[in-house]
Amino acid sequence: MSPQRSTRLRRRLAATLVAVVLADLVFVGALLGAIAPLVETLRTAIAPAIPATLWWLVLVSVALLALVAVQLRTARTMTLSRTDVRRLSESEAPALFERVRRLATLADCQPPAIGLVDSDVPNCFSVGGRDPMLVVSSGLRDQLNDDELDAVLAHELAHLRNRDATVMTLATFLPTLATDRPVAGLPRWLRANLFGGAILFAFVVALGWTQSASPTAIGLVAALSLVLGGIALGVLATPVVYLSHRLSQDREFVADRAGATLSGKPEALASALEKLDDSVGSTPQQDLRSLDGVVDELCLLPHGFVRDAAEGDGGRFTIRLRSHPPTSERIDRLREFAAEIES
């Protein structure tokens, strides 16, 4: 990994994380602003000697950290549940666990948990957090030889070691709320409007307008906030989506090179990418387990775990945003790296 690319990856990691935190700060600010009188009453009752500025700074910081922690846990849970990931035990796949353990030792990181997606579409991804997990599909294990599988697993471990898997998992939360598929039984438009509308209405309350308004006016503002909530959520999510896409460009190149170095076989990773990319689209769609681009951008290749739909079967291809660099370019760079090592 070149110093220039490493520096750029760190900058984009930082920029994406800042965007996520700022979006969360908007939510925290609106919520605490809406209940500001109650918060001040609480400060007077339990800690009157603490200056108001310090009180609010501590309160906002604690609330922000709590929200980020909940957001990461929720994003991780939604991602794993929507792709039907099943956590594997070592007794079910001892050889796979041994591979991951050996590569993790070489990478100087803790071996992650391993999950399985029962799909013939070959792909994999990693999610970060307190309990990181490396997820593979059954199709991936079936189609790769030993060297190729080692190289792909090393690629995913590089994502976990570089912490970009954690940042990308965190960044999927807002886009997940705005996807076209239901989450927690709620359709997209209702979920997005409720969440965004709550933020808008909290801002109105925080500005103090409702204190002198009639119940009818408050009801109208609440209804308008609900109608415009989806737009507000989209505006809030846009910087996060944009920066996470830019991050995805660099993180794949860095993980490719790190994975090739870790496995010691750049050509094996190039061969795996070529083989997996060629296999997608060769048969009709078997299942539809993707977050409309959200899970796709976490994966080794940007097709999630679905295939193109056969004509007339009513299916649809779920790629909305291609955040990955072209696979052909990744393969070319790996083969150039292999030639450098040989020479």
Image: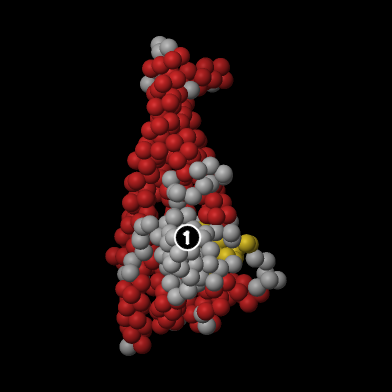
Q: Which color scheme did the rendering employ for the protein?
A: secondary structure
Quadrant of the rendered image containing residue 264: bottom left
Can I make out residue 48 in this image?
Answer: no
x 56%, y 68%: residue:
119
The residue at which mark 1 appears reads as 314
Say if 302 sits above or below 11 in the image.
Answer: below
Can I make out residue 117 in this image?
Answer: yes
Amino acid on which disc 1 is placed: Gly
Residue farthest along the bottom direction in this orientation: 343
Which secondary structure, mark 1? loop
Residue farthest along the left direction in this orientation: 4
Residue 276: percent from the left, percent from the top? 45, 75
| Pick the front one: 204 or 216 | 216
x 31%, y 65%: residue:
5
Quadrant of the rendered image containing residue 275: bottom left
How many dots with numbers? 1
Q: Residues within 10 Å of mark 1 (few under 14, many from 20)?
A: few
Residue 296: percent from the left, percent from the top? 44, 60
Quadrant assignment for the C terminus: bottom left
Say if 148 sits above or below 220 in the image.
Answer: below
Quadrant assignment for the N terminus: bottom left
Say if 275 sits above or below 205 in the image.
Answer: below
Residue 104: percent from the left, percent from the top? 54, 70
x 49%, y 58%: residue:
290
Residue 170: percent from the left, percent from the top? 46, 50
| Pick the front one: 120 or 203 | 120
x 48%, y 74%: residue:
283
In the image, is 145 to the left or to the right of 193?
Answer: right
